[in-house]
Amino acid sequence: MNCKQFNSISLEEVLLSLGHLPTKQNEKEAWYLSPFASESEASFKINKKLNYWYLFSEGIGGNNTAFMKKYLNTSVNEVLIWAEDQNFSSFQNQNISNQKLENLSKNYQITEIIDVQHPALLEYLNERKVENQIQFLKEIHYQINDKNYFGISFKNNSSGYEIRNKYSKICLGKKDISTIKSDSDSLRVFEGFFDFLSFKNVEKFLEKEPSDYIILNSVSMISNIKNSLDNYENIELYFDNDEAGSRAIQIIKNENQNAEDCRILYSDFKDLNDWMIHKNLSPERQVKLRRR
């Protein structure tokens, strides 16, 4: 990876990988507490269109490389070595399009949305152990730069689509959360839709009644749900077992005393879907798979 490639990665994803979440955001910008020092009011701003940051408390800013040089206090070469090891989704998705993810909405065309039926997609869902939850999904066919693609789609509240297959992880249209209502006074919140689908597989086994559900579609969307939590008596949180997930849960629990961290269910796994995939395997096999 070179500087140009690293600087094309969404800075929001870079910050997320380091465990930093926005305190507020909109389509044009996102605000964070300074990643470099302790502060009570956010002074770190990202311009989403330019993918540039500016730290008002110090009067400095720049691109991804400049940020990580300061964050790691190291050289450009060391920054690029670090970036190579992160497996950023927005870098991997450049194999599909030379555009950054946030610009895909201007360059795609949806050609067909149907019930899931393609053998490759059914096999993919089977591998993820959620093949019996396709009522929440659609098969989507689309074009980017005159090339044809297809995948599993999960619709969000802004009529955008989270799309997954074995080789890609993108969002077409505006990024947003997905809400599924059941007129319940309980709410369950998930990071991604595969975690939601995995939970639906074991909901009855866990003796849980159906509830309302929010799927963030990215932990960075957490600021979008703050006003949605006030009307619930019980809130269950099913986030990833990583620093970003822990910080997101803490943010919610700080403002909602009735919120519960439910990660104990899959405490030895990356996330709920990882637990679903590997829970019936031997401990030795689980270890081998998690190391891959």
Image (spheres, rainbow, N blue to C red):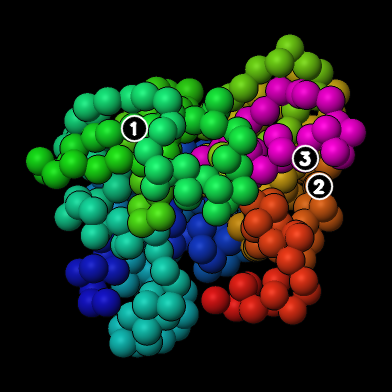
Task: Please name the amino acid that badge 1 sits on.
Answer: Ile
As drawn, is 285 to the left or to the right of 123?
right
Residue 148, horizontal then vertical, whole percent: 18, 41
Checking the image for residue 262, the label placed there is 2
As drawn, is 12 to the left or to the right of 269?
left
| Furthest-top residue in this view | 183
- Give the CA distance from mark 1 to mark 2: 32 Å
Q: Quadrant of residue 186?
A: top right
* Relative vertical location of residue 210 with respect to residue 221 in this rendering, above or below: above
* Relative vertical location of residue 292 with respect to residue 203 in this rendering, above or below: below
Checking the image for residue 140, the label placed there is 1
Q: Could you tell me which residue is drawn at 55 percent across and 48 percent down?
A: 126
As drawn, is 188 to the left or to the right of 140?
right
Checking the image for residue 149, the label placed there is none
Q: Quadrant of residue 5?
A: bottom left
Q: Nearer the viewer, mark 3 or mark 2?
A: 3
Q: Nearer the viewer, residue 246 or 71?
A: 246
What's the magenta region? 195-219
Residue 1, horizontal then vertical, whole percent: 27, 77
For numbered disc 1, what is the local secondary structure?
strand
Q: Could you tell me which residue is drawn at 42 percent across and 69 percent down?
A: 87
